[in-house]
Image (cartoon, rainbow, N blue to C red):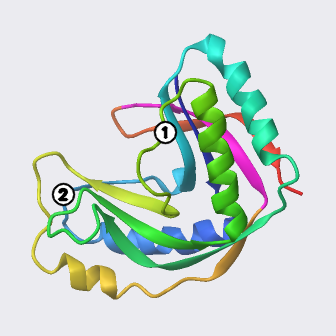
Amino acid sequence: MRLFIAVPLAAQARTEVGAVLRGLKAHDWPVRWVREEGLHLTLKFFGEVTTDRVDAIVEMLNFATEGMTPMTFRLVGTGVFPPGVRQPRVIHLSVDADPSCELLQDRLERGSERLGFPPEGRPFRPHITLGRVREGQRLQAGWQSELERIPEGAAFLADRVVLFESELTPSGPTYAIRREIRLG
């Protein structure tokens, strides 16, 4: 099973990000867009995990979130990965996160490493993935100006962290909650 830990978007933020996503989908770009119901901010991606390791991941998640309170996030515009390139692979919304988010992500990274999962290997940049450019495709000229037109968004409170199972389907991934932890 494919597992990851993420912060699901609060209803208000999901509505706002959904509007941005629908606006971007109107462009004829070669992008696999994320489903609105799947919008989230990933804290740790595990990839394929055997069933016998799930309990250890849940225990590590419980430990990492202990004492954590709800976190404030603010949508601060769009971005791409890799940053600063002419032909990106990922389009995302950048997120200005409460400092406790970085602490939580670090706890998850260190706890995961103790369980034998390799560290991410790059700095944590809080973001919400909107879409991935299809393999071998390129965005048409003018995509940068379209992304720059998207205004900054509102602040929202994240009050839970979720261990998701991701199932890949022909119409895109679907997510099932394996464990949910309320913050505060």
Question: Can residue 9 be seen by looking at this rendering?
Answer: no
Question: Along the line of sight, which residue is nearer the eye, 81 or 111?
Answer: 111
Q: Who's the residue at 55% across and 14% down the image?
A: 50
Residue 155 x %, y %: 66, 80
Q: Position of residue 171 (x, y in %)?
A: 36, 39
Element assignment for label 1: loop
Q: Specify the amino acid type for callout 2.
A: Pro
Quarter-wise, where is residue 80 in the image?
bottom left
Instruction: Identify residue for label 2.
Output: 30
Q: Is residue 161 magenta?
A: yes
- Place residue 90 in its image quadrant: bottom left
Quarter that holds the C terminus: bottom right
Asked if residue 80 can be seen in this view, the reply is yes
Report crowding for label 2: few under 14, some 14 to 19, many 20 or more residues within 10 A (C-alpha): some
Q: Please report the bounds of the magenta region as a residue range.
A: 159-169
In the depicted structure, whether residue 66 falls above or below residue 131: above
- Main secondary structure type of the part rendered in magenta: strand
Q: Nearer the viewer, residue 138 or 34?
A: 138
